[in-house]
Amino acid sequence: MRVAGRRAVEAVRRRLVPGAADRGANPVELAVVMPAILLLLFGSIQVAAWFLARSTALHAAQSGVNAQRVHDAPGGAGVARAQAFLTAAGDWLADPQTSCVDGDDQVTCTVTGKPLSVVPGLSLTVSQTAHGTVERWTEAGG
């Protein structure tokens, strides 16, 4: 009678303990889902790095325009200021290239570079442009 009672108790325990029959299923499920989780994780980090590089390029271009649009600014002041900004900002933008075009009444600076790559084999390019009006003296008409 004792053996039958123990068997009955063991059968009830197996039914009451959740997942007792599915031992080892969690590691298999994790192995199936983990590549997707890692892809989402690295993808979100790559998107964040792209946005940071884009923001850095835009602020460098705006800084270059602000330096070049000043009344009687020397040639190359915008490029120098944009490069100084990129140096101070760090390495968010790899291989940056800066160009500023000074027209009659407009200044345009463009900063191009590559964001940091977290995903192997992925090569992105970021390019941002800023425009501004050149400061000049005017005389009041009277």
Image: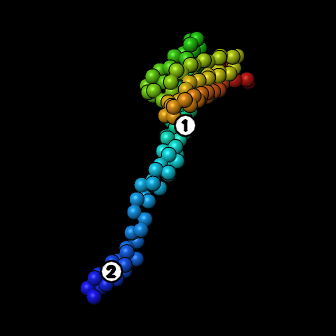
| Residue 104 drawn above or below residue 124 | above
Residue to which mark 1 is pinned: 51
Q: CA distance from mark 2 to mark 1?
A: 63 Å
Residue drawn at (45%, 54%) of the image: 28
**Residue 100: percent from the left, percent from the top?**
61, 18
> Going by the picture, which residue comes out furthest to the left?
2
| Residue 29 drawn above or below residue 48 | below
Residue drawn at (56%, 24%) of the image: 113
Count of picture labels = 2
User: Residue 32 versus residue 73: which sits nearer the camera?
Assistant: 32
Reading the chain from its start, which is encountered first: label 2 or label 1? 2
> Going by the picture, which residue comes out furthest to the top?
75
Report which quarter residue 105 is drawn in.
top right
Residue to which mark 2 is pinned: 7
Q: Amino acid at mark 2?
A: Arg
Camera-near label (2 vs 1) is: 2
Which secondary structure lies at badge 1?
helix
> Going by the picture, which residue comes out furthest to the bottom?
1
Residue drawn at (37%, 78%) of the image: 11
Q: Amino acid at mark 1?
A: Phe
**Residue 91: percent from the left, percent from the top?**
45, 26
